[in-house]
Image: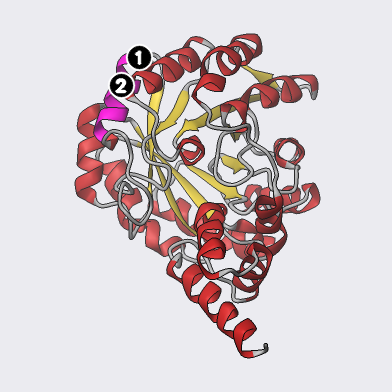
Amino acid sequence: MTLNLVDTSLRDGMSSVSHQFTTDQVAAIAGGLARAGVRTIEVAHGVGIGGSSLQYGRAAATDKEYVEAAVKAAPGASIAALYVPGISTFADLDDIELAGATTLRVAVHCTEADCAEQAVRRARQDGLTAMCFLMMSHKIEPAELAQQASKLESYGAQVVYVVDSAGAMVPTQAAARVAALRGAVDIPVGFHAHNNLGLAIGNSLAAAENGATYIDGSLRGLGASAGNAQTEVLAVALTRSGFQLDVDAFALAELAEQVVAACMKAPQIIDEAALLIGYAGVYSTFFHPTKRAAAKFGTPVRDILLELGRRNIIGGQEDMIIDVAAELAGQREASR
């Protein structure tokens, strides 16, 4: 079976560099990925097009500039962008289409497939490949997730993803969700892993073994909190497992070593906050805001993340990080 290895170093990986990749760096990485055989390369702000802001972090360039740089450097690849309803707009979509993007990846919470309908239909109308993300897929059982995937297929999605946004899954959970989607839809299924429990590669292998044919990675594991499945490691591990990939694993490893490593502010590790995100099952982009809130209010990171998990706080509710930190600080003060 031939798998499609999708690289998201230049989108999810933006979180690792505070969205400060330059257009020259984007061109160097995108060009290297294309030469190594990667055919879908995701680019632009880490939380999706239109995300450059005080709330989510200002990027070093516009989404349009990033896409233009990638398109020019990687003519043989499809340059993809992430569209998150509520953050991204059709005006943002117009910009990246003009810049040459040919794939749109629409991301919604796992229980809110209907929020993707407008963007998916617009993408198909414009001739873009439409992929859909069911974020925080660990939050619901496989059968319910499959129902949401069926909705996405009915809107025109051409690939639907199980997305472990919190890095909270173990391989049996990844396998069950992918298998459920494979039984419910006639379109390909993808898998996007985060590494908060150190299982991004294992979960991706389990996903592939259960029928996922699109597997996401990022070079050096770049990504929010503990990062993502490592593209160059995926290429080797999947090949060793008997899957066929039309990529050059050695070229990917060299690109990661020679280009991406030099762009990194620090190694991608599983520190306390990243591990707790996986344990609590909260969104990976809560990593830096939670650390800042902990420092401001003198509240332990652990307490904030565990409480966010208990309250089932999801992406788009980042304001609750401050509320929870302040509330916990008040409780500690009152108990003294």
Quarter occupied by residue 135:
bottom right
Per the rendering, the mark at residue 73 is 1
Q: Report x, y in % for residue 315.
A: 48, 61
Amino acid type shown at disc 2: Ala
Q: Main secondary structure of the magenta part?
A: helix
Query: Which residue is tagged 2?
Result: 69
Task: Provide the secondary structure element on which disc 2 rests.
Answer: helix
**Residue at 27% in and 47% down:** 122
Left or right: residue 211 versus residue 148 is right
Q: Secondary structure at mark 1?
A: helix
* Quadrant where the N terminus is found in the figure: top right
Q: Viewer-proximal residue, 197 or 4?
A: 197
Placement of the C terminus among the 4 image quadrants: bottom right
Image location of residue 331, percent across then percent down: 61, 85
Q: CA distance from mark 1 to mark 2?
A: 6 Å
Asked if the residues shown at circle 1 and circle 2 are in contact, with their CB atoms under 8 angstroms apart, the answer is yes
Give the residue drawn at x 57%, y 50%.
185
In this view of the protein, can residue 50 be seen by the observer? yes
Residue 200 is drawn in which quadrant? top right
Q: Position of residue 118 (x, y in %)?
A: 30, 56
Asked if 283 appears above or below 248 in the picture, the reply is below
Quarter where residue 220 is shown: top right
Q: Is residue 71 magenta?
A: yes
- With 307 as the anchor, is 41 left or right in this view? left
Q: Residue at the spot x=65%, y=10% of the render? A: 250
